[in-house]
Amino acid sequence: MAESLTLPQFRMLVLLHSRGAMSLSRLAEHLAVNPSTAMRMLERLAAAGMVVRDTRPEDRREVRAALTEQGARTVAGATERRREEIRRIVQAMPARQRTGLVQALRAFAEAGAEPAAPHRQPEPLGW
């Protein structure tokens, strides 16, 4: 299923990964789609085992969604592959251009609520 995810479906998984379980209406708001579209996305992701959905006991009309382990692994794997590719490209750039690009990419990731990268020793980039 991970290979056949649409970009909006993946974005939903990233939102749930970075912000935790949330209501369907909140997901729709974050994705800038109407609730019925968000529900269809949620149903497909649930059928694929990427999310679970439930209702709150105090308000059975409110549908909530959360990532499953499979969904979390999908987000983490795709994010790591993307980071590795970006790292490869940045390392190929002239050193004098890297600093500005890295700062811009960090700001971009932060603005997009990108899941935080695991902390590890940085590789020496020679700059």
Image (tube, rainbow, N blue to C red):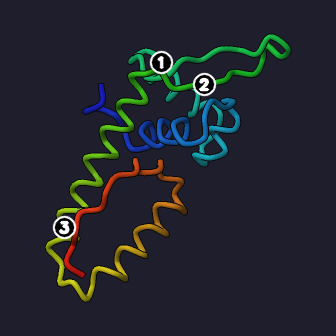
Where in the figure is residue 65, as x and y percent of width and height?
60, 25
Q: Which residue is mark 1?
A: 46
Which label belongs to residue 65?
2
Where in the figure is residue 49, as x and y percent of width and height?
41, 16
Which label belongs to residue 89?
3
Where residue 71 sits, quadrant-wise, is top left
The residue shown at (30%, 46%) is 80
Q: Is residue 39 visible?
A: yes
Residue type beneath disc 1: Ala
The residue shown at (46%, 61%) is 109
Looking at the image, which residue sits at the far right?
A: 58
Kindly report which numbered mark, 3 or 1, lies closer to the viewer in this rendering: 3
Q: Is residue 56 left or right of residue 71?
A: right
Q: Is residue 38 left or right of residue 25?
A: left
Element at badge 2? strand
Compared with residue 52, is residue 72 higher up or lower down, i.e. above or below? below
Looking at the image, which residue sits at the far bottom?
A: 96
The residue shown at (29%, 54%) is 83
Residue type beneath disc 2: Ala
